[in-house]
Image (cartoon, rainbow, N blue to C red):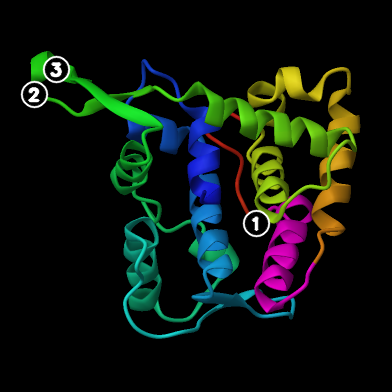
Amino acid sequence: MLIAEKLYLLMADDSEKPETVVSATGYGMNAAIITDLMIAGRVALSEDQHRQIHLIGAGPCPDPVLAAPLEKLEKRGNLSLDEAVKINSLCDARSLTDSLAKAGIIEYGERTLLGLGKQRVRLINQQIQRQIRTDLQGALHGQKIPGTSDTTVLAILQAIGLVNHVLEDELAPMSGSQAQSRIAELAQDSPAADSAQRAVAAMNAAIVTQRVIPPAPGKK
């Protein structure tokens, strides 16, 4: 499962439209998509302080969730990570929910505005969301070695100021400062077996220490 999909499911609410859920994360969903592109071998990150985005690989991207953001990055050319996460709608909400619907995790519900507006979504596979939360809880409390996606989700949620809100039960009994320290520790100690994982590890470290992602609207 893509990191962007995990982040979406943690934020999802049956009463909200996909676009609302995505915008609630600020630029976090864009950072998730960029990380997914790194793992897919289509984007690399320079190892210097400028954190430049480099496109690698060739040919079409088979995953429709990643294809559109990859095309946007290609059109923009030379970008730093800080600039890339701020591209408007880099993460496309509809392609994300289409993918989750195809996997049988969500389904589309009624349209808003008397049937003329955009469709809401409804979570129909609760087990997937519960497993994501269980994995994050295990990582936070040292009961499980976190995967790359777990560490990235935690780093993004902390950066946008939503970790305590989204993972209140999973964090307990940690205090806010303890959670912040633990997530920073996980982000900076991420295992890196190959170049893609090294790029993700560098990105996670930057996310939690250097304000690469602005806080979500209303958060500081």
Judging from the image, what secondary structure is the residue with disc 3 in? helix
Check disc 3 and give the amino acid type. Answer: Leu
Q: In the image, is residue 159 part of the stretch drawn in magenta? A: no
Question: Dot 1, how many residues are within 10 Å of its Cα: few (below 14), some (14-19), or many (20+)?
Answer: many
Where residue 93 appears, x then y in whole percent?
34, 43
Q: Classify the position of the C terminus by image quarter.
A: top right
> Do callouts 3 and 2 mark residues in contact (Cβ within 8 Å)?
yes
Question: Whole-Å distance between the Cαs marked 2 and 1?
Answer: 38 Å
> Do callouts 2 and 1 mark residues in contact (Cβ within 8 Å)?
no
> Residue 59 has which mark?
none
Where residue 7 appears, x then y in whole percent?
55, 39
Q: In this view, does 14 lie to the left or right of 180?
A: left
Check disc 2 and give the amino acid type. Answer: Leu
- Write down the residue under mark 1: 212
Boundaries of the magenta span: 192-211
Determine the residue positioned at 39% across, 69% down: 70
Determine the residue positioned at 36% across, 29% down: 106
- Write down the residue under mark 2: 116
